[in-house]
């Protein structure tokens, strides 16, 4: 920003700095997150849709706490993000996790929904897109989730493409995930990311992961196993001003993966049911997740928990490596 816009800002600041400060008035760090910042400890963002809409109570809250503990044990500080009482909360207390996990009333908050839930003072669980926006505003570079949203099967008709992909195209946060679920068209999801210049990195294997199973059948763009090298890749991108996200895919641990044929059949059935019942819009993904959970007799939940924990370890190591890379340069 500059030129004529400068005249609009008080105190000689630019309009850009003014809007940054205005954004900060909507954010609130938890005491542990504030302490980590003061101590220079790296932060790892976590989403809350997975807690409010992705898993049942009480496993959701227990998992959220265990994931936070894993990140802390590796020397980073977890910052679970949600909208509560008119603020974007960066880091949640045990009571706040409990509220999100059991109220059943949290809105699913993507880019479109963030102003509505903030302005109304309501309760909101942030999606991958919503969490990326909040993480970037909070200065957090690494965000751990389960699976990213993507291009839905049949999107040529339905136009259903997750806002997560648009966000990856523009917001500079590294997103650690176990790939994308096969409820999506994974091939088209990767095409979309390529068009928008979003690099897809894989670690532990060459291929992009498929959430409940390790292998989507599609190659990731680059395989980088070493966190220091992952950090170097990400620094190079952002140093060049190539804004936007980076996807880091890591597969579910073998012992927790589900049999491919079983999950494929169940996914087809859930997709048929969604079509028959006319489910559309933001309800599609939660509907499919809930049906898959029911149709696997809850076994998919154990897989889901295992992959999120594994992602948390990969994300914490990346956050530490990024912090180290910045220190070396300073
Ligand atoms: N994929 C999963 N589990 C999830 C989600 C996606 O395997 O819980 C959630 C994430 O919060 C993601 C959102 O950002 O669903 C995508 O929803 P939609 O397809 O409506 O954009
Ligand atoms: Mn959608």
Image (cartoon, helix red, strand yellow):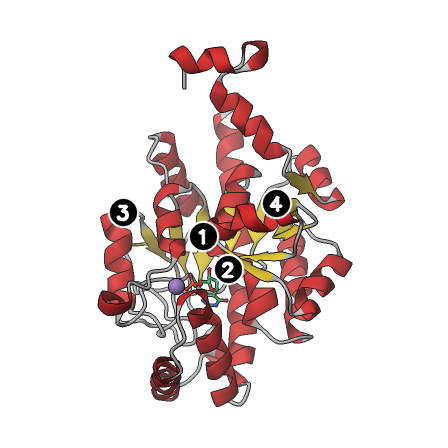
Left or right of 37 in this view: 225? left
SS type, badge 4: helix
Q: Position of residue 111 (x, y in %)?
A: 46, 49
How far is mark 3 from mark 4, CA to CA? 31 Å
Of callouts 3 and 2, the N-terminal one: 2
Vertical arrangement, residue 198 with respect to residue 293, above or below: above
How far is mark 3 from mark 1, CA to CA? 15 Å
Residue position for label 4: 119
Vertical arrangement, residue 69 with respect to residue 330, above or below: below
Answer few, some or many: residues within 10 Å of disc 1's Cα (few below 14, many 20 plus, some between 14 and 19).
many
Vertical arrangement, residue 255 with respect to residue 156, above or below: below
How far is mark 2 from mark 1, CA to CA? 7 Å
Of callouts 3 and 4, the N-terminal one: 4
Of callouts 2 and 1, the N-terminal one: 2
Residue position for label 3: 196
Does the residue tagged 2 have its C-beta within 8 Å of any atom of ligand 1? yes
**Given this view, does label 1 or label 4 mark the residue nearer the observer?**
4
Asked whether disc 2 touches disc 1, contact meaning CB atoms under 8 Å apart, the reply is yes
Residue position for label 2: 145
Q: Residue at left 70%, top 49%?
A: 85
Q: Position of residue 305 (x, y in %)?
A: 56, 72
């Amino acid at each position: 920003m500059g030129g004529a816009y400068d005249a609009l800002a008080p105190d000689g600041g630019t309009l850009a700095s003014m809007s940054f400060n205005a954004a900060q008035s909507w954010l609130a760090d938890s005491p542990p997150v504030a302490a980590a910042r003061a101590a220079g400890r790296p932060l790892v963002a976590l989403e809350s849709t997975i807690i409010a809409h992705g898993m049942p109570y009480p496993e959701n809250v227990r998992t959220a706490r265990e994931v936070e503990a894993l990140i802390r044990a590796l020397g980073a500080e977890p910052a679970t993000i949600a909208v509560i009482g008119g603020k974007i909360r960066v880091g949640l207390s045990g009571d706040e996790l409990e509220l999100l996990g059991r109220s059943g009333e949290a809105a699913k908050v993507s880019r479109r929904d963030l102003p509505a839930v903030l302005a109304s003072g309501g309760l909101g669980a942030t999606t991958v897109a919503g969490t990326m926006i909040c993480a970037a505003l909070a200065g957090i570079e690494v965000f751990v989730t389960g699976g990213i949203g993507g291009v839905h099967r049949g999107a040529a008709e339905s136009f259903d493409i997750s806002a997560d992909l648009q966000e990856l195209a523009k917001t500079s946060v590294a997103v650690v995930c176990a790939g994308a679920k096969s409820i999506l068209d994974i091939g088209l999801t990767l095409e979309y990311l390529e068009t928008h210049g979003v690099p897809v990195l894989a670690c532990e294997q060459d291929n992009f992961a498929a959430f409940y199973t390790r292998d989507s059948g599609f190659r990731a763009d680059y395989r980088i196993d070493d966190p220091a090298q992952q950090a170097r890749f990400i620094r190079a991108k952002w140093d060049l001003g190539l804004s936007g996200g980076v996807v880091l895919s890591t597969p579910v641990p073998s012992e927790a993966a589900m049999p491919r044929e079983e999950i494929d059949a169940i996914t087809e059935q859930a997709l048929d049911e969604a079509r028959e019942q006319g489910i559309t819009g933001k309800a599609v993904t939660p509907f499919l997740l809930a049906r898959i959970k029911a149709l696997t007799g809850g076994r998919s939940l154990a897989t889901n928990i295992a992959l999120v924990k594994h992602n948390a370890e990969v994300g914490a190591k990346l956050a530490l490596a990024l912090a180290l890379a910045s220190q070396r340069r300073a």
